[in-house]
């Protein structure tokens, strides 16, 4: 036991040397997803609970014990002021932002729902039943079911298109007509995440350990980066610093220059297990005293090790 404690203390010291400012150990279950809603951060857990943290104090506000057996992803639907979530039981759960109470369960999918995306007045959902479905965001009515005969993992909107990540490619669809546009091939395994970087670039992350950078006009892959030692699980972009952040099952977090694609920073062993999600949080400051709000100064990470990491965004890495 003493050796285990010593190992944990050494790991914590190493993380602090790499910019860890706070490690939150309040949760007992693996954290699978994270969502920024107003003053709070919502953390979805593998046991179906949603932990609500206050962004500024970084302290837990409440633990919501939902009826879902797990919470795999969370999506904020601003038009209806609701939060939609997926679970391993093939259902979509909808909660009120104001009350936190569940308002609807949608059970039309015949396989596990893998991703959700608000698109104008609608919400798109992808599933292992090889269909995507389109719902009215306010009435929850199922409006369209499209069979694609591909295993779908992730979904993203950019310009006129919806990007859907499959087991080895990216499908682009017209977001107004739900008609296929093209198929982008470069990844060799499941596409887990997307992020828009400016008007003309989308980055994608895959289980093949790479990140691809796509020209959104031509659909051409302009760069493929050997990014991590295992599947890449999440991406985010900061326009304030022109940086892209990635995380992986290899337990690391990396920071990339969005223009040169150079790896500026690698936080190895950021967690004791797979890193599942990243989010930039404005940790405070007097925004009223400046002509524009300050850039985000903290990076939050979640992991299957049940911990939340809060990392400094060091000025020396700013482009």
Image: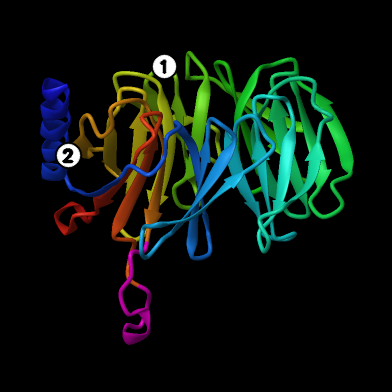
Along the line of sight, the residue nearer the viewer: 203 or 90: 90
- Kindly tell me whether residue 242 is visible in this rendering: no
* Eye-nearest disc, 2 or 1: 2
Could you say whether the residue bearing mark 1 is in a helix, strand or loop?
loop
Magenta-drawn stretch contains 315:
no
Along the line of sight, the residue nearer the viewer: 309 or 233: 309
Is 40 left or right of 292, judged from the image as shown? right
Q: Residues within 10 Å of mark 2 (few under 14, many from 20)?
A: many
Q: Earlier in the sequence, mark 2 or mark 1?
A: 2
Identify the main secondary structure in magenta: loop
Q: Which residue is mark 1?
A: 208
Along the line of sight, the residue nearer the viewer: 109 or 8: 8
Residue 167, position in %: x, y? 57, 16
Is 108 left or right of 11, judged from the image as shown? right
**Magenta segment, which residues?**
282-293
Q: Which residue is mark 2?
A: 15
Q: Quadrant of residue 85?
A: top right
Q: Quadrant of residue 155?
A: top right
Is 37 left or right of 24, judged from the image as shown? right
């Amino acid at each position: 036991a003493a050796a285990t404690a010593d190992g944990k203390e050494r790991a914590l010291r190493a993380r602090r040397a790499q910019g860890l400012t706070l490690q939150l150990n309040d949760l007992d279950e693996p954290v699978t997803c994270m969502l920024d809603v107003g003053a709070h951060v919502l953390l979805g857990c593998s046991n179906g609970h949603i932990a609500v943290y206050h962004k500024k104090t970084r302290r837990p506000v409440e633990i919501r014990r939902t009826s879902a057996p797990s919470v795999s992803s969370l999506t904020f639907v601003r038009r209806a002021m609701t939060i939609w979530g997926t679970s391993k039981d093939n259902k979509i759960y909808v909660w009120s932002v104001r009350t936190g109470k569940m308002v609807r369960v949608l059970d039309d999918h015949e396989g596990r729902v893998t991703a959700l995306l608000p698109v104008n007045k609608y919400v798109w959902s992808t599933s292992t039943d090889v269909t995507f479905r389109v719902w009215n965001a306010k009435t929850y009515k199922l409006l369209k079911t499209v069979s694609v005969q591909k295993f779908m993992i992730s979904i993203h909107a950019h310009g006129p298109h919806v990007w859907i990540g499959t087991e080895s490619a990216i499908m682009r669809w017209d977001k107004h007509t739900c008609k296929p546009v093209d198929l982008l091939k470069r990844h060799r395994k499941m596409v887990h995440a997307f992020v828009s970087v400016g008007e003309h670039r989308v980055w994608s992350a895959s289980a093949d350990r790479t990140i691809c950078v796509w020209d959104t006009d031509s659909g051409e892959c302009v760069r493929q980066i050997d990014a991590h030692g295992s599947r890449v699980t999440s991406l985010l972009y900061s326009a304030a610093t022109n940086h892209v952040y990635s995380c992986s099952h290899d337990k690391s977090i990396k920071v990339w220059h969005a223009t040169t694609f150079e790896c500026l920073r690698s936080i190895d062993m950021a967690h004791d297990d797979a890193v599942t999600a990243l989010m930039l949080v404005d940790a405070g400051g007097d925004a009223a005293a400046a002509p524009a709000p300050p850039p985000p100064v903290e990076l939050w990470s979640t992991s299957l090790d049940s911990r939340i990491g809060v990392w400094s965004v060091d000025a020396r890495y700013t482009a």
